[in-house]
Image (cartoon, grey):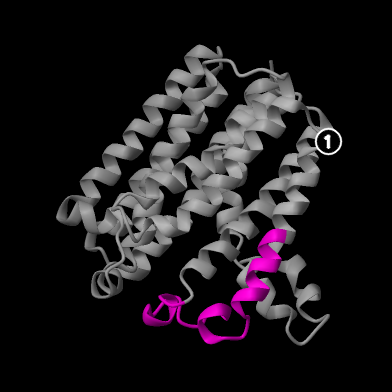
Amino acid sequence: MLALLTKPLARLHPRANDFVQLMRLDRPIGTYLLLWPTLWALWIAAEGVPDWSVLVIFVLGVILMRAAGCVINDYADRNIDGHVSRTRQRPLATGRVTAREALILFALLVGLSALLVLFTNLLTIKLAFGGILLAVVYPFCKRFTFYPQLVLGAAFSWAIPMAFAAQTNALPPALWLVFIANLVWTVAYDTEYAMCDREDDLRIGVKSTAILFGEADRAIVGMLQGLTLICLILVGIRFELGMFYYAGLLAMLLSFAWQQWLIREREAQACLNAFLSNHWSGMLVFIGLALDYSLR
């Protein structure tokens, strides 16, 4: 849906498509992976009936901040992406967008996101600074640590406490179970993603959990997926969720099993397909959660 909406935008100006690609609006998988856990948090915080204003703010915020994250990521990797087969045609790597233009676009996207947050409350505004910091720091982590996926997990999970804060003006301790579940899940699926580029990353000296885990990658991804499910079961117990929620977790389990099958040979396209299928994993949990609250 999001990719379809970007086509008219790409026709407005000869260079518009370059900026659409820079923000990855034509590849919305990252938006979906950020959106589903945010919706989990909103539905749990609101017990199934989130304020419409908060819902709109967070859906728009997800789109804007994911786009901002892609821009700053490509800015950080502008001298690296040209050496990786999957990324060598990105706008910054080819020079179709300049570094200065990318920074201006990043500032604009963050500014629009900050404007949205101003319509919430003081607690949410304070938390927003942490989200911006994580978005800026993550792209540079792969130069210094084998755990950039862990930083990405924190960045992709930061909307969870913000959603609770915006909806309830409080941070109940149990929300951190949702945060940890999503952080661990993010490390799992981004390791699958990093498995696509492992040979290129080894050649140019970029670090990732896929490189760190080596031959144990499949087993560790499986353990992380199992830990994700355990944390989400604890979420269900703590927030007294019912059978539809647990049906959603069962569907997530089956999707994880399918991903393990896909990555069994560690073939790059299969690992990419496994990563992409996590959109369905998150959506199925949300469907179960929404049904559980709506049918009570």
Q: Quadrant of the C terminus?
A: top right
- Image position of 171 (left or right of 125): left
In terms of depth relative to the viewer, which is nearer, 127 or 232?
127
In terms of depth relative to the viewer, which is nearer, 174 or 268?
174
What secondary structure is marked by label 1? loop
Q: Position of residue 75 (x, y in %)?
A: 54, 69
In terms of depth relative to the viewer, which is nearer, 206 or 7?
206
Q: Position of residue 42 (x, y in %)?
A: 67, 29
Q: Report the residue at 66% width, 65% height from top.
A: 25
221 to 45, vertically: above or below? below
Q: Name the residue at the front extreme.
A: 100
Q: Name the residue at the left extreme.
A: 215
Magenta span has 166? no
Q: Report the residue at 58% width, 38% height from top.
A: 130
Residue underneath mark 1: 119
Residue 90 visible in the snapshot: no
Q: Amino acid at mark 1?
A: Phe
| Quarter of the image where one finds residue 92 | bottom right
Residue 245 visible in the snapshot: yes
Q: Quadrant of the N terminus?
A: bottom right
In this picture, which residue range is highlighted in magenta?
A: 79-107
| Quarter of the image where one finds residue 10 | bottom right
